[in-house]
Every structure is written in structure tokens, then in C-alpha cells.
Amino acid sequence: MRNFDVKIVSEEIEKLCMNANFYIPKDVMNSLVDSLEKEESPVAKDILSQIIENDKLAQENSVPMCQDTGLTVVFLEIGRDIHLNGDIYEAINTGVKNGYEKGYLRKSIVQDPFNRVNTKDNTPAIIHTKIVDGDKIKIVVAPKGGGSENMSTVKMMKPSDGVEGVKKFVLDFIDNAGGNPCPPIVVGIGIGGNLEKSALLAKEALLREINDINPIEFYKDLEEELLEKINKLGIGPMGLGGRTTCLSVKIKAHPCHIAQLPVAININCHAARHKEVIL
């Protein structure tokens, strides 16, 4: 059994909050550059060039790539052979508080949905925990901006709607979202489970690498088809037209009830922020 001081978690969360906001993932940057080379619309090319320049400036100067530095979402995997010395949830929120203060990141969390009083330190974080084999702790920090998160949905579809119904639902939703989620976007789709599980699946799907390949051929083909059809919608970067609306579509599926076909859509803007560490 490994004894683990949760103060280390606070220190790592602090760094992850800043790094996720300052340094765009390499796979996302590479995808933006590749999209710029393929884009045909002059307006879209100009916007993509500005996005890339913005992300490079953020990296060089260690400043946020976007003014909306997000609600902090933490995916936590704890090995069953580890003993935590302290409250890991309190440690996570301490790390968020410190990271957002030291990184001069915008504090965007309110205490209550209706009184709208700001907590002034970007806590509490949203934390998803899994118990896994081993004696390690894996932490993924994914700051989620309000604009792209607002362009999310869950639909409890009927099994008879089938894959064609799912395709139509996704394409109609993305089309209606237009430029609101700040395209080019990454689309996470959760299929199965139940109401809340499908939403979590969609958010987890966004943590995959841009160019990775779904190991299940059916979903690989569906991801590719949806990506092609989304980019044919003509929404383009920031909604101003072009062929680059979506960088990638990621699907994660789970068993579900015989009478249900839950489908959730969660969108990342072009920043697609997330950083991880294994302790």
C-alpha cells in the first residue's frame, strides 16, 4: 500500500490549471495548421491564421489563449493500492484556487445559479472520480468555457431512431449552433448509458487525441462520416463560412436500457484545453 500526501495534488492541479490555459495541446495546434493549408475561403484562412498566432503568443508569454478560462473540470483516477493522507477533493479545490490566482486567470464561478455571487477563486471544480488498479493517481484538468459548454445537449432518443436518427440529431444541432461555440470545434458524442452517463461519455470523448482512431470500426466510420458532413455545413471558423467547421468528432459508447437510446453532444471550441499528470 502506497501512502500519498494529497498536498502534492494541490501543487499539480495549480500547474495544470495554468498550463491548460496557456499552452494549446500539440495535436490541436497541428490540426489547426493542417486546416489552414486545406482551407479555401480567404476569410476562413485569415481567421485560422489569427487563431494560430493567438495560440503561439499565449505559449510564448504564458498568458491565457482565451479570456474565458473556464470552469475547471477534473477527471481523477485513483489506484486501489494507494492510501490518501488527507481530503483529495479539498486538495483539488485548493490547487484550482491557487492556480487561478497565480496565473491571473479569470474567475467565472458563481455560488448559486440564481444569486450569481462570484466565488472569486474559480472553485468549486467539477470532479469525476474512478477507482482503478495500481498505486498511481492520474489527473486530467479540462477547463471548459461557457460558450462551447452552452452548445451542449442530451436527447433521450428511441431505439427505433437508429444510427440515421443519431446522425440527423447531431448534424441539426451543430448546424443550429452555428458560430456560437467558436469553431473550428471538436465534437464529443456520448451514446448509451442513461441521461447523466451519456453526457459524461461525451465529455470524456473530448479528451482523446485529435487524430486518434476509434478502435471500434463501426464508430470509427461514424466519426469520419459525421466529420465530413459537419464540415460540409459551411459554418466555418467563427461561423463566417468555410470548410473548417470541425477538427474532429469523437464518440464514446456504453451499454444502455432496451427501451432507450441516450445521445449527448458536448463541444470544445478551437482551444480544446486539457492537461494531465500521473503521480
Image (spheres, rainbow, N blue to C red):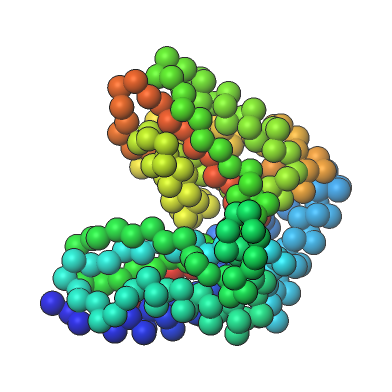
- Residue 142 relative to residue 176: left or right: left
Can you give x and y, in whole percent of width and height, for residue 232 in the image?
69, 32
Residue most extreme to the left = 1
Residue most extreme to the right = 42
- Residue 240 relative to residue 60: left or right: right
Image quadrant holding the N terminus, namely bottom left
- Along the line of sight, the residue nearer the viewer: 107 or 113: 113
**Residue at point 50%, 67% (across, down):** 124
**Residue at point 73%, 45% (across, down):** 180
Residue most extreme to the front = 115
- Along the line of sight, the residue nearer the viewer: 216 or 16: 16
- Along the line of sight, the residue nearer the viewer: 4 or 238: 4
Can you give x and y, in whole percent of width and height, for residue 128 in the image?
38, 58
- Along the line of sight, the residue nearer the viewer: 159 or 29: 159
Residue 250 appearing in the image = no
Task: Residue 235: name its quadrant.
Answer: top right
Image quadrant holding the C terminus, namely bottom left
Can you give x and y, in whole percent of width and height, for residue 98 in the image?
53, 82
Number of labelled discs?
0
Residue most extreme to the top = 160
**Residue at point 51%, 75% (across, down):** 96
* Position of 162 relative to 11 (above/below): above
Residue 190 appearing in the image = yes
**Residue at point 81%, 48% (across, down):** 44
* Position of 172 relative to 147 (above/below): above
Can you give x and y, in whole percent of width and height, for residue 61 in the image?
70, 81
